[in-house]
Image (cartoon, rainbow, N blue to C red):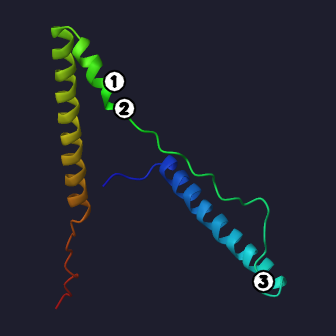
Amino acid sequence: MPRPTSQDLAGFWDLLQLSIDDVTMKFDQLQQIKNNNWRPIDSPEKKPPAPVPKKTVRQKSVITREKSLDLPDRHRQEARRRLMAAKRAASFRQNSVSERADSIEIYIPEAQTRL
């Protein structure tokens, strides 16, 4: 088993510090609510984000562009699509293999006592 490096440990402690800061902030907010006789504090700085309109993709322009391509360009586009589909499939297979590897349990029997 590889030994953790100092960078690994520094990253771990950084992540842990973020969690500690988050818990501390939540307790501070709870204390403020308690000081306000358990009434929620309205903060003007929190506004709900404006809804982002969805962009519609126009398939019509893609079709007309493909029709205008020369035969070699069209073959290149089709080959590119096949390559991207193959890469997506390989990525999906790789992710599913790693998910199965994460679920592997290692059984270590208890140490036998000497008679």
In this image, 9 relative to 44: left or right? left
Q: Give the left or right position of residue 43, taking residue 61 as reference.
A: right
Viewer-proximal residue among 7 and 20: 20
In the image, is residue 3 above or below residue 83?
A: below
Residue appearing at x 15%, y 9% in the figure: 71
**Mark in front: 1 vs 3:** 1
**Mark 1 and mark 2: Cα distance apart in space:** 6 Å
Instruction: Identify the residue position indicated by label 1 in the image.
Output: 61
User: Label 3 belongs to which residue?
Assistant: 39
Quarter of the C terminus within the rendering: bottom left
> Which of the labelled discs sits on residue 58, or is there none?
2
Mark 2, secondary structure of its residue: loop
Q: Is residue 115 left or right of residue 7?
A: left
Q: Amino acid at mark 3?
A: Arg
> x, y (%) of residue 55?
46, 39
Residue type at numbered disc 1: Ser
Pointer 2 local density, CA inside 10 Å: few below 14, some 14–19, many at least 20: few
| Amino acid at pointer 2 | Arg
